[in-house]
Amino acid sequence: MSQTLLLLPGDGIGPEVTEQARRVAEVLAPDLTFEEDLVGGASIDAHGEPLTVDALVRAKSSDAVLLGAVGGPKWTGVERHLRPEMGLLQLRKGMDTFANLRPAFCFPALVDASSLKREVVDGLDIMIVRELTSGVYFGEPRGFERGIGDKSFGYETSRYTKGEIDRVARVAFDIARGRRGEVVSTEKSNVMESGQFWRETVIDLHATEGDGVALRHVLADACAMELVRDPKQFDVILAGNLFGDILSDAAAMLTGSIGMLPSASLSYDGKPGLYEPVHGSAPDIAGQGKANPCAAILSLEMALRWSLGRPEAADRLFGAVGKALEAGARTGDIGGSMSTTEMGDAVIGAL
């Protein structure tokens, strides 16, 4: 079966880490067909917009999309709707990748790289399921109102429909059934109407489709506190777009480095997923060969598992990253001195 992986390297360190993921893929799945296109600032430079219609069409017709990173100071002066980050939002919306999976897994070899005590993070394995295509990031109306003096203001709308909540909650329930069977749904139902609606909708869905899953509710700020105090209490965390964004970045640092964490953005069965490292474009180290490619490589691992139907290859790759780390492979962010390419070499060697 021929499968196509579309590479969107993007900006900053994106091309560097994506190249290492491609090298790994060529060893692990040599029958894959690779295509490449532009997104973010690279697309602005070439086409005057952060995502072209052609790039979106190619993404939707692929089997999976692997993205590097977008953004950087070069494009800070462009109009808001043309910023590199808009390309990523348009890609997510266009592909309808409504369920963002962000694992926070602490490899045994990196337990001491975390800023928290060993006993707090040893064995950490959390899956955050974040709604990705609605909420305050996409809600209308939004904008700026320019007035005189303190009369100016900016605003956006936090809006969720029942269908949008139901579909991402189903994903969280399904994933939990293959893990410990526990879902924590988080919002701010104490002060936000959309949060209250979120809670009520998740409760209703759990009553009819939650067999085998224990559900509890934690306010988003309390969840952030508990992630630092006792993170291993969590199995699957379900959150809306804004709080899922914040909580997943907090969880990333429990593992030792944000450079280690991948993500998957999924649509309905049969549609391609979007895979990308959690880290940003890191323009301060771009082009220097310092970036940790593990998050991009592990994003490939998620693509193999969730979109390409190759769980055995995914297992091999996850094991190879762990083996490379156990052998002492490290980039600067996790206490070593390896270059981006050398870290890729170490994972390929472990394969």
Image (spheres, rainbow, N blue to C red):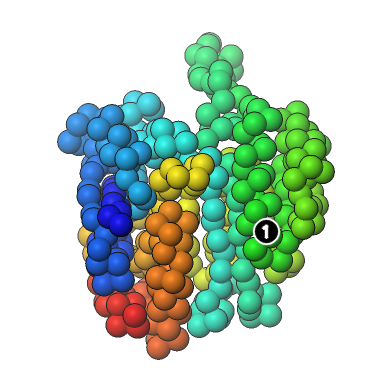
Q: What percent of the width, then of the height, locates residue 118?
A: 64, 80
Seen from the viewer's position, the closer of residues 171 and 3 is: 3
Q: Report which residue position mark 1 lands on.
A: 176
Give above or below for 77 relative to 271: above
Q: Residue furthest front?
A: 1
Judge whether 135 appears above or below 320 on screen: above
- Frontmost residue, 148 versus 89: 89
Q: Amino acid at mark 1?
A: Ala
Based on the displayed image, in which of its 4 quarters is residue 187 positioned? top right
Residue 228 shows in the view? no
Q: Position of residue 342 (x, y in %)?
A: 26, 77
Q: Quadrant of residue 49?
A: top left
Q: Residue at x 37, y 26 (%)?
A: 81
87 horizontally vs 269: left or right: left
The image quadrant where one finds the C terminus is: bottom left
Element type at mark 1: helix
Report whether 318 appears left or right of 188: left
Is 279 drawn above or below residue 72 in the view shown?
A: below
Residue at (32% x, 45% y) in the render: 62
In this rendering, position of residue 233 left or right of residue 15: right
